[in-house]
Image (cartoon, rainbow, N blue to C red):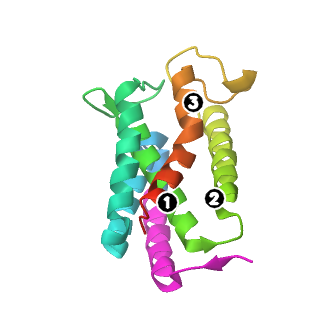
């Protein structure tokens, strides 16, 4: 049985996110999808911080630093527009921060049996699905010729990046759980 914790604030937050999404979604017609996603994820992270304040502050910092590690080490250059601060591309930095924080917040708010194992499997399934959809249907591609993961049309990136992608979610969940960030 799935039990949702903190329903009132979560519902309020989801309403604000839905309104933000409705406002920002039409801009996809005029601007690059990655730019819209950076704006939406940034607004959502700010909204989450406003709603939960100190409860997600440390989680947000840890997610940001994990994202910063990979985005400062690997050069992300996409075939479409790139938003850079120095060498760091904002799209993967904000996307990783958002995704990791979302994973943790779902993990904390949903009470199910074997939650760590199920959330790691959920993370991997979602990661691979999103990688496939954005690469094949939305054309979000790195400007490189790296082969896909396991010969599939997934994760066209250097091996170190593929490794990071696979372990980032579980490492983040285990780290925040170990530090008992709630």
User: Is 23 included in the stretch rendered in magenta?
Assistant: yes
Across and down, in percent, residue 163 comes to 57, 30
Q: Which residue is mark 3?
A: 163
Q: Residue 35 occupies which quadrant of the picture?
A: top left
CA–CA distance between discs 2 and 3? 20 Å
CA–CA distance between discs 2 and 1? 10 Å
Q: Which residue is mark 2?
A: 116
Across and down, in percent, residue 139 comes to 58, 32
Q: Which of the two marks, 2 or 3, is nearer to us in this view?
A: 2
Magenta region, residue range: 1-24
Which badge, 1 or 3, comes first in the chain's sequence?
3
Seen in the image, is 133 located left or right of residue 61?
Answer: right
Mark 2 surroundings within 10 Å by alpha-carbon count, few (fewer than 14), some (14 through 19), many (20 or more): some
Across and down, in percent, residue 152 comes to 74, 26
Q: Does dot 1 land on a helix, a strand or a loop?
A: helix
The main secondary structure of the magenta stretch is helix
Which badge, 2 or 3, comes first in the chain's sequence?
2
Residue 165 against residue 62 in the figure, above or below: above
Q: Does dot 3 land on a helix, a strand or a loop?
A: helix
Seen in the image, is 151 located left or right of residue 156?
Answer: right
Seen in the image, is 105 located left or right of residue 1?
Answer: left
User: Is 114 included in the stretch rendered in magenta?
Assistant: no
Which is nearer the eye, 44 or 96? Answer: 96
Q: Which residue is mark 1?
A: 177
Q: Residue 149 occupies which quadrant of the picture?
A: top right
């Amino acid at each position: 049985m799935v039990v949702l914790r903190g329903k009132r604030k979560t519902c309020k937050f989801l309403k604000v996110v839905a309104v933000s999404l409705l406002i920002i979604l039409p801009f996809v017609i005029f601007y690059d999808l990655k730019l819209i996603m950076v704006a939406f994820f940034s607004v959502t992270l700010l909204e989450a911080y406003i709603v939960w304040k100190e409860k997600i502050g440390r989680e947000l910092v840890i997610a940001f630093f994990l994202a910063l590690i990979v985005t400062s080490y690997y050069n992300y250059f996409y075939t479409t527009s790139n938003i850079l601060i120095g060498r760091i591309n904002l799209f993967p930095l904000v996307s990783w921060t958002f995704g990791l924080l979302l994973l943790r917040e779902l993990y904390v708010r949903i009470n199910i049996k074997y939650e760590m194992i199920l959330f790691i499997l959920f993370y991997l399934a979602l990661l691979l699905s999103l990688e496939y959809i954005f690469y094949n249907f939305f054309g979000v591609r790195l400007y490189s010729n790296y082969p896909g993961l396991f010969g599939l049309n997934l994760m066209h990136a250097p091996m170190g990046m593929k490794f990071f992608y696979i372990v980032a979610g579980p490492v983040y969940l285990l780290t925040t759980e170990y530090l008992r960030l709630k």
